[in-house]
Image (spheres, rainbow, N blue to C red):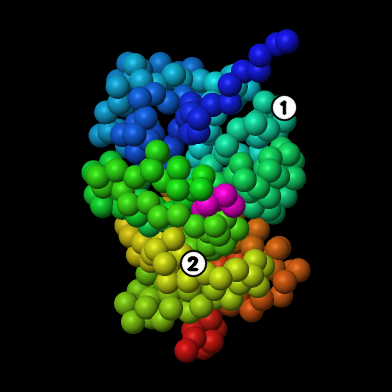
Amino acid sequence: MAIADPVPSLPGRVGILGGGSWATALAKIVLTKQPQINWLLRSTTHVKEFTRLGHNPGYLTSVAFDTSRITFFTDSDVNDFFRACDTVILATPSPYIRYYLKRVRNSVIRPKLVINAIKGMVPEENILISDYLQEYKELKPGQIAVIAGPCHAEEIAKDRMSYLTVGCFDLGKAKMLSEELFSNDYVHCAVSRDVVGIEYAAVLKNIYAIASGICHGMNLGDNFQSVLISNAIAEMSHFVNTVHLLSRDVTESVYLGDLLVTAYSSYSRNRTFGNMIGKGYSVRAAQMEMNMVAEGYYGAKCVHEINQRYQVTMPICKAVYDILYGGAPVELTIRQLSTLFK
C-alpha cells in the first residue's frame, strides 16, 4: 500500500507573492523568523537585479537581503511557486491579484494556507479577497487568513515599532502565524477571528485617507481633520457592523490605528493621492505623477457599488467616490460634506 506524503507542519514553506514595498517589508519580517522564503516577482529582470544588488531595486532599497535564503519565481512560474509553498502571503496591489489567482489551478492552491496582505478588494468582482478565495479557488474558511494594522513598510525598513493583527477563521492558526511569521523585536502581532471586518476596514481606511489628503491639500486645518477622522471611524463601524455582524472593538489598532496612520502619515500613498486632488490635480494627473497604486481609488468604487445593496449612510465614502468617479467639484463637495459632521 502506498504511503501518503506527510502533511507539513504549518506554516511550512512560506512564499510571498508581490514585489512592492509592502511585500518587501513582509519579506524582511518573515525572514527574521524563517530560514528561507519563496518570492514571486514580476519579471526575470527584476529577479536578476535583486540578486545582483542584494536588495529590491525598486522598493525599500535600504533593506539588504541574503539572497541565498530566497528562492525567486516570476510571473510565468506562478503554479510552480504555489506548489513550492505551504503558506502563501498575497501582497500585490489589488488590481493585479485576479491576474495571478485566475492562472493558479485550483488543484494547486486548494491545499494551501493563504494569507491576504492586500489592502483592497478584487475590483472586477467587487468582493473581498477571502470571498474570492472561497468562491473561485475552493479554499475552506480555515485556510484563509488576513494580516493588517498600522504598519508602514517604510518604518519596517527602519526597524521602528509596529503593530499587526492576524485574522483567521481558525484562531489557532492565527496564533501560529503570529508567533511563527510576524512577531519579532519590533513587530507586535495580535490575533483575531474577524477576517471580514479586518478586510473591509483595510479597504475603507484607504478611502478615508484620500478624503484626509484632499482636505489637507485644501488647507482646511487640523481641527477639520480631527472631525473628519472621528466621523470616518463612526462610518466604518456602521458599515462593517452592517455587512458582517460580529462583536468587535473598532478602537483596536487594526481598525482605528490603521485608519489614523493612513490618514495622517506622509508615507501614505492614499493621503498623497488625495492631497494632489485637493491641490487641484485631476484624478488622471495625480495617478500619473504618483506612478504608484493608491488602493483607495479602487476601493471607493468597490464600496460604492457594494453599498447599493446595504444602503448604509456613508457620506465620506460617497464624497470621495463622487470626486474620483463622478467629476464632482472638490471644494463644493467637501463643503457640503462638512455640514453633515458632528
Q: Is residue 56 above or below residue 246?
A: above
Q: Is 125 left, or right, of 259 in this rendering?
A: right
Q: Nearer the viewer, residue 262 or 195?
A: 195
Residue at the spot x=25%, y=45% of the render?
185
Residue at 53% across, 81% down: 337
In the picture shown, does residue 287 fall above or below 14?
below
Q: Is residue 238 above or below residue 257?
A: below
Q: Quadrant of residue 45?
A: top left
Q: Which residue is mark 2?
A: 208
Q: Which mark is residue 107?
A: 1
In the image, what residue occupies the spot 52% across and 69% down? 248
Near mark 1 (Cα within 10 A), the count class, few <14, some 14-19 or many ≥20, is: few
* Numbered mark located on residue 15 in the image: none
The magenta stretch spans which residues? 167-171
Secondary element type, mark 1: helix
Relative to residue 257, is residue 125 depicted above or below?
Answer: above
Residue 315 in percent (x, y) is at: 58, 77
The residue at 70%/63% (across/down) is 306
User: Can the viewer see residue 295?
Assistant: no
- Say which quarter of the image contains residue 223: bottom left
| Residue type highlighted by circle 2 | Tyr
User: Residue furthest toward the top?
Assistant: 1
